Amino acid sequence: MRVFITGASGHIASAVIPELLDAGHEVVGLARSDAAATTVQAAGAEVLHGDLDDLDTLRAAATAADGVIHLAFKHDLMASGDRAGAVTADLEALKALGEALEGTGKPLVGTSGTLMLLADGFTGRVGTEEDVVSGGARVDAENYVIGLADRGVRSSAIRLAPLVHSHLDHHGFTPVLIGIARANGYAGYPGAGTNRWPAVDTRDAARVYRLALESGPAGSRFHAVGDEGIPFREIAETIGRNLGVPTQSIPEQETEAYFTFLAAFVAADNPTSSAITRAVLGWEPTHPGLIEDMDSGHYFAEHAAATH
């Protein structure tokens, strides 16, 4: 299968591309800069220069491909404060890809997140793939992808755990939390720290993408989740132990000052099941869970190497 991937130089793609190549697929990766192109080419994929605003390029690439995986998102735009602009660009890009694939029966795999389940109040219980959020920022993109199933596209959406971890992870929430703890001299957790976050190894998540591309039924939602829900206090204690700093509770009124941009959802209780994903795709995570991965030391050794 000839597969077109957006966001091909990013964290998730760094595992998805080799996963696809090892399975015998060809990969064409979208790259918006020369540096990104070098990364994509080094991974073994063919480079297509362009970005999410090049809608004609996206349509042509999707038309020429046997399947599409959409990983790109304008995280830099969101970080600058223009979240609405990033969300709009993402949806417009998806529409360009979807329009090109309508009526072909080809697969389109989109990307979402388990934290979006909180938008419709799925709290106090374990979230499942059958939970559907009515709408909202980025949720609309997920629902658009699922709706393409009625328009002749074998579409599916993968909800990623908020903590996608591995030695490939250099800018995700795990290194962000470690950086916050290092900067403050202690590892913090919100309130009692009993709220739970799911997690998954990058390479296990990549296998979900490949399986969804190859055999995911049209209109499916899948959960790339290995650890169903780790208490946030345990995450903070692991960070503190590895940094050699104390661990302490962060009162609600100090959450924003400590967690910065993570403050909006750091206290979220987001336990999430992947039982349906495992049953439908025959997927099982095979790599270490979050705590074991952090305790292996690479998150902390990499920083030490970078600062000396």
Image: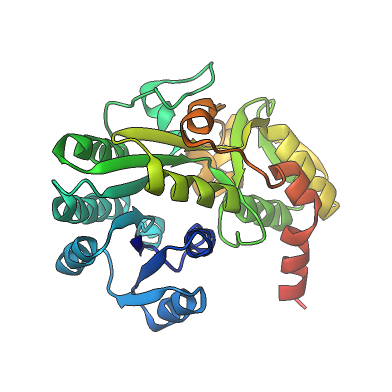
Q: Nearer the viewer, residue 282 or 192?
A: 282
**Residue drawn 37% across and 69% down?**
29
Residue 248, position as x, y percentages in the image: 76, 37
**Across the whole image, how many numbered discs are drawn on residues?**
0
Residue 245 seen in the current view: no
| Up-down relation of residue 141 to residue 130 (above or below) | below
Picture coordinates of residue 96 (x, y %)?
17, 56
Rendering coords of residue 41 (x, y %): 45, 79
Q: Is residue 134 above or below residue 73?
A: above
Point 21% across, 55% down: residue: 97
Q: Position of residue 234 (x, y in %)?
A: 75, 35
| Quarter of image, res 32 | bottom left
Q: Is residue 86 left or right of residue 127?
A: left
Judge by depth and name the residue closer to the eye, 67 or 90.
67
The quarter of the picture where the N terminus appears is: bottom left
- Residue plotted at (66% across, 28% down): 191
Can residue 286 be seen in this snapshot? yes
Residue 258, quarter of picture: top right
Q: State the quadrant of the C terminus.
A: bottom right
Q: In screen coordinates, is 210 left or right of 184?
A: left
